[in-house]
Image (cartoon, helix red, strand yellow):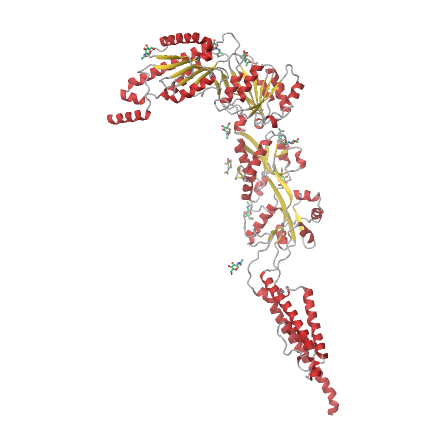
Amino acid sequence: MRLEVFWWIVLVKIVKCDNFPSLLTANASIAIVIDRQFVGDEHDTIKFEIEKFVDYVKREVLKSGGVNAFYFSWAAINVKRDFSAILSITSCEDTWRLFRAADPENILHMAVTESECPRLPTDRAITVPLITKGKELAQLMLDFKTEDIYDWKSAVVIYDEMLDRDMAGGLVKAISQRSNNEAKATGVSLIKLKRHLSKEDLRAVLSTIHTDTVGTNFLAVVGYNLVHGMMEIAKTLNLVNTETQWLYVISDTDAKFHDIGTFRKILREGDNTAFVYNISHAGDECVGGRKCHVEELILSFSEALSEAIKDEYEIASQVSEEEWEAIRPTKDERRNFLHANIKKDLTKNGVCGNCTFWKVSTGDTWGGEFQGKTNTINLHDVGTWRPNDGTSFTDVLFLHVAHGFRSKLLPLVSYHNPPWQILKLNTSGEIIEYSGLVFDIIRELARNLNFTFTVELINKTTIKSFNDSNLGAQDYALTNDIPRDLLTLVQNKSVAMGACALTVLEAVKNSVNYTIPISTQTYSFLAARPRELSRALLFISPFTGDTWLCLFAAIISMGPFLYFINRFSPVCDYKGIPRKGGLSSIQNCIWYMYGALLQQGGMHLPYPDSARIVVGAWWLVVLVISTTYCGNLVAFLTFPKIDIPITTVNDLINHQDVVSWSFREGNYLESQLKDAREARYRTIYNLRVKKSTNYTKFIKEIEEGKHVYLDWKMRLQYIMKEQFLEKGRCDFALGIDEFVDENLAFIVSPNLPYLTKINREIKKLHQVGLIQKWLKDYLPKKDRCWKNRHLVEVNNHTVNMDDMQGSFFILFLGFTLAVIWLTGEKLWFRHKSKNQRKVIQPFAS
Ligand SMILES: *[C@@H]1O[C@H](CO)[C@@H](O)[C@H](O)[C@H]1NC(C)=O
Ligand SMILES: *[C@@H]1O[C@H](CO)[C@@H](O)[C@H](O)[C@H]1NC(C)=O
Ligand SMILES: *[C@@H]1O[C@H](CO)[C@@H](O)[C@H](O)[C@H]1NC(C)=O
Ligand SMILES: *[C@@H]1O[C@H](CO)[C@@H](O)[C@H](O)[C@H]1NC(C)=O
Ligand SMILES: *[C@@H]1O[C@H](CO)[C@@H](O)[C@H](O)[C@H]1NC(C)=O
Ligand SMILES: *[C@@H]1O[C@H](CO)[C@@H](O)[C@H](O)[C@H]1NC(C)=O
Ligand SMILES: *[C@@H]1O[C@H](CO)[C@@H](O)[C@H](O)[C@H]1NC(C)=O
Ligand SMILES: *[C@@H]1O[C@H](CO)[C@@H](O)[C@H](O)[C@H]1NC(C)=O
Ligand SMILES: *[C@@H]1O[C@H](CO)[C@@H](O)[C@H](O)[C@H]1NC(C)=O
Ligand SMILES: *[C@@H]1O[C@H](CO)[C@@H](O)[C@H](O)[C@H]1NC(C)=O
Ligand SMILES: *[C@@H]1O[C@H](CO)[C@@H](O)[C@H](O)[C@H]1NC(C)=O
């Protein structure tokens, strides 16, 4: 056990590697740097005073230990020595240089330095700027800046005669300088107000400010009496809104009179306004100055040191020596201990400069109007400033710039209208779920602007009767039919926003404001999917009707032509060849030509060359005709012939005698078509029919190609999906034309200050594609009908009975014709032989 502890101690010692003497074994040492260049002739006096005071402290305060003080009269000292602390009275630059050298050695740094010097890090050092009373403004603004109380890239400084030239210069330097502490630089525009300014003058001055060029951050360093008027005028000039920040610095108040509360009444919804005001004491009992501060610091340090020594004795007396060596505070720990104690002591007992005291109040405005009956726009005290210890804030300076609505509850109003707003009720009629595109967006807005929301519901009863499974053509709520109640609630500012997708209508624009569109819906139409034509007559389709007619005429006329050529050719007579066989009758010649057409060839060729030329020419014709026919037939077999589809508005109008069309009465499309400039859209409007109330019938009519339905493309997709799920076929097709854009947006209370903020957030959501993605999630998923909605797919086709039936018909026709002909022939010959018998009989008898 003992051994274990020993090893542990050894280990810790190696790790610590921090070989500074404990306060028990050696006196703490402090370096007191009084820079001769900084203090000038007073150096010796100051040094003497300090030495005297240190002696006094050693005697009276540090009872149980000691402190060794080393004095330097230049700033470039070697801090590597075993100092516990440095007290420096140097210029700002030297203070920082000293700090950078001392900080890695974990030496506590107490700096008394010039005014307008950025403070050393407040968690490791103590800075006391020597401020002349009444000139603290620059230091105050600098402290705000280095502490990141405000974060401005640009600032408009408006100041009145209360600030003299030097002070104004110091202030601007404090705001704009890029300080040691890497605080960001700020661009500054200056506006000086004249003495005795009338309201009109003030308005004239402020109206020259263009926030595009000078930025949106205002620092008004003005007298108390001017603040009221300035706030009002700035508000009317729209210089106070959600985007701008106003910091009023009021220096002519004091401990007795500082009624900032009156400004609360001028604060409006959406303002970012804060006040920094002087509550310093004016009395003579106020003490300050270098001597006071230095002595106070030394005193506090000694007390802290004394405390530390006492602590160490106490602990050391309870443990063994080895253990003590292990657990005694490191140099860093000791510095923190001293720092914390000095700070505490200064805050509690510090009297130097205790008269100078400033307070910070800020407006809690956002969402105040919507927190019920009482106006809850408030002023909160968020911080203080003192020269000794600088800023001390309990909250941020501009509440809403940092935290948006600060989780305030905003009332919204909505109603059920899928897929935009989908509200679910439980059996007792409470809303248990909000979804739909609108609430996806609202939720994102709430996250980014930091608000929570409640939803007031209008038309609660419609939710239950609504069936989500057919979002298509049933009686959905029209987005351009904005419920009266909803409009009233938004208009009289009972709610902040209508959380519902509503059509942007000019008529509504003058009572409420719209956000930018969350979605744009286009209209299209739903028609029957074009069908394949019957293939029974496929074999005649390669040629058009007149081609067939010409061909027929050619066959009929070529026969007689061949006959006459053949008949009147003198070659046979000349050569004495008997004219017999096939081509000696017109009838045979026609059959011959027909046979040639089908590439069967005749039994004989005509003998005369002239007739052979005719036949030869015919063969050439036949070659062309039959090749064309065969080729085309194959093509028709492969690519089925499709009905002419209705895909555009013009198609639709051209088919007006075949199809009727309709759309939902009272929707946005109706109003747009009615007033359309293009004649074809007015035609669509004029020739519309009333939509059938019987849904089954209505769908059937579309399916049969008798009717076309015009609506949002989205809804048509729902109908298609529904029908596909029901029947498993793709019976519908969408038009290619998309016409009439309908913009959907939220409505907000008139002149709601947050409209620009909301719009920006919505725009961002559009840009990253979130809204599109969310909407897609609510739309029907892609299916078989989805692809080639407009075209019928071309697939490879095996020839089947549908294609062949035509030829079988021909065969059957030929057969029937032959039988009829046979009967005719039979009858004809019987009749003829009867006549012959009649004629012959007299000879016989
Ligand atoms: C420590 O300080 C005491 C009184 O402050 C002094 O009497 C003593 O000499 C100092 N010891 C050392 C080692 O400097
Ligand atoms: C703050 O108020 C005190 C007391 O009225 C006054 O002496 C001091 O000059 C004021 N500060 C400024 C910056 O005006
Ligand atoms: C400042 O300190 C002095 C001296 O202790 C005291 O009389 C005075 O009341 C203090 N002032 C404030 C504002 O605390
Ligand atoms: C939202 O507001 C609350 C209350 O003020 C605050 O605590 C929180 O940090 C804020 N959230 C954001 C992200 O700003
Ligand atoms: C409906 O929801 C409300 C609020 O969440 C709850 O108080 C109530 O018990 C629920 N009713 C049923 C039947 O679940
Ligand atoms: C409720 O909805 C129906 C149909 O959507 C509508 O006709 C009616 O005007 C609505 N009622 C109210 C109070 O808005
Ligand atoms: C909605 O319609 C589907 C089929 O059309 C039906 O099965 C379901 O019960 C209906 N739901 C309600 C709440 O009416
Ligand atoms: C706003 O209108 C609603 C509905 O008409 C009404 O109940 C409410 O009291 C009105 N609120 C105000 C502040 O006028
Ligand atoms: C809001 O509507 C009012 C009319 O009610 C109009 O004057 C104002 O310009 C609108 N605001 C915006 C930002 O469009
Ligand atoms: C709707 O039309 C279908 C087919 O035309 C018919 O069978 C059905 O009875 C009709 N329904 C109603 C409610 O008229
Ligand atoms: C076309 O024919 C090929 C080979 O016979 C077959 O694999 C393919 O599935 C056919 N495509 C269609 C669309 O029928």
Relative to 824, say whether 468 is above or below. above
Q: Quadrant of the C terminus?
A: bottom right
Question: Considering depth in this image, is 620 or 489 the residue closer to the camera?
Answer: 620
Relative to 631, say whether 333 is above or below. above
Which quadrant would residue 158 be assigned to in this image? top right
Asked if residue 85 lies left or right of residue 775, the reply is left
Name the spot of residue 381 as percent of width and height, x first.
Answer: 52, 20
Relative to 322, say whether 842 is above or below. below
Relative to 361, say whether 485 is above or below. below
Asked if residue 60 lies left or right of residue 502, the reply is left
Name the spot of residue 442 as percent of width and height, x first.
Answer: 55, 35
Q: Quadrant of the N terminus?
A: top left
Name the spot of residue 170 as percent of width and height, x first.
Answer: 54, 17
Residue 125 appears anywhere in the view: yes
Name the spot of residue 392 as percent of width and height, x first.
Answer: 48, 19
Which quadrant would residue 124 be assigned to in this image? top left
